[in-house]
Image: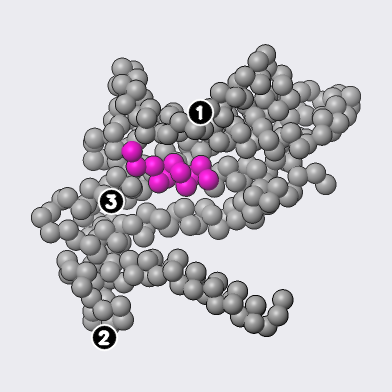
Amino acid sequence: MSRKSRWVVYSFAIFWLIMVFFPFVWAFRISLIPTYTTYVSFFPRSLSELSLVNYKYLLYQTKFPRWLLNSLIVSGTATFLNTIACFMLGYVLARKRLPGSDWIFTMVLALMMVPYQITIISLYLGLSKVGLTNNLLGLILPMSAHPFGVFLMRQYILMIPKDYEEAALIDGSTRFQALFRIVLPQTLPAIGVLLVSMLIETWNNFILPLVIITKTSLKTVTVGVADLAFEILNTNWGVLMAGSLLGALPTIIIFVIFNKYFLKGLTLQGGIK
């Protein structure tokens, strides 16, 4: 690559980085203002213009800590159950150990094409009949199985030769031992992608908690922070920005932790060695 081409690439990368991070920086700047206005300069004229009053209000005078805990419970449990279900069903469909595996996989692909919002009314009616509205379990169960996860695990497991499992069975291992000792370690990159993507999706889910949950103490971060805009006549944008930043922090931490497996899974590396 020539010096001119390298300069163009670096300039584009820097411009892209600024465009991505500028909204977060601006949101952080607004979260530090002690007033209701957003008409502030990007660079403060003095340190007296900066204040943590919005964060104190958010943590001590609202139910934000409870909303954060609810999101952790719902996202963590749903992601864990979703990973187990997708891994098991993906393995069964990849090895075709279920009658009509091809038809089932076709239905999984069809479900991926159905917009989530179409099913929200029927989902609410079904959950209300079994008494799972205003219940965290009513949020966890619908998000505990995702067709994308089944598709991802099935395609990844197809890359793993059956010879490894057959060799383990010959050595005396059971089917479950071969599954968890041979197949599972080789699917860790795909599981990393599934964990990160599903955790972010369940954490940022807004429609389902909005419809299922009406109690303030059971709301998640996404719905709770949105409700802060309607608590008073004049919207406190500083509190909203503080809630948005704190609400996004867990997903950023998770992505950093699982970044290695996430990148390996996207490039389909880390499979057979």
Label 3 close to label 2 by CB (< 8 Å): no
Q: Position of residue 189 (x, y in %)?
A: 67, 46
| Residue at (74% x, 49% y) in the render | 270
Whether residue 157 sits left or right of residue 138 in the image: it is right
Which stretch did the figure color magenta?
A: 197-207
Is 63 in front, or is 99?
Answer: 99
Whether residue 253 sits left or right of residue 7 in the image: it is left
Is any part of residue 168 visible from this angle?
no
Q: CA distance from mark 3 to mark 2?
A: 29 Å
Q: Which residue is mark 3?
A: 225
Is any part of residue 113 visible from this angle?
yes
* Prevailing SS of the magenta stretch: helix
Which corner quadrant of the image does residue 85 belong to?
top right
Label 1 close to label 2 by CB (< 8 Å): no
Above or below: residue 207 compared with residue 174: below
Q: CA distance from mark 1 to mark 3?
A: 31 Å
Q: Amino acid at mark 3?
A: Val
Is 205 in front, or is 224?
Answer: 205
Above or below: residue 104 compared with residue 77: above
Q: Position of residue 16 (x, y in %)?
A: 49, 69
Q: Which residue is mark 2?
A: 45
- Closer to us: mark 1 or mark 3? 1
Q: Which residue is mark 1?
A: 111
- Examine the structure image and report whether residue 45 is included in the region drawn in magenta: no
Dot 3 falls on a residue whose secondary structure is helix
Mark 1 / mark 2, whichever is N-terminal: 2
Is 204 in front, or is 100?
Answer: 100
Which corner quadrant of the image does residue 247 belong to?
bottom left
Whether residue 169 sits left or right of residue 101 in the image: it is right
Q: CA distance from mark 1 to mark 2?
A: 54 Å
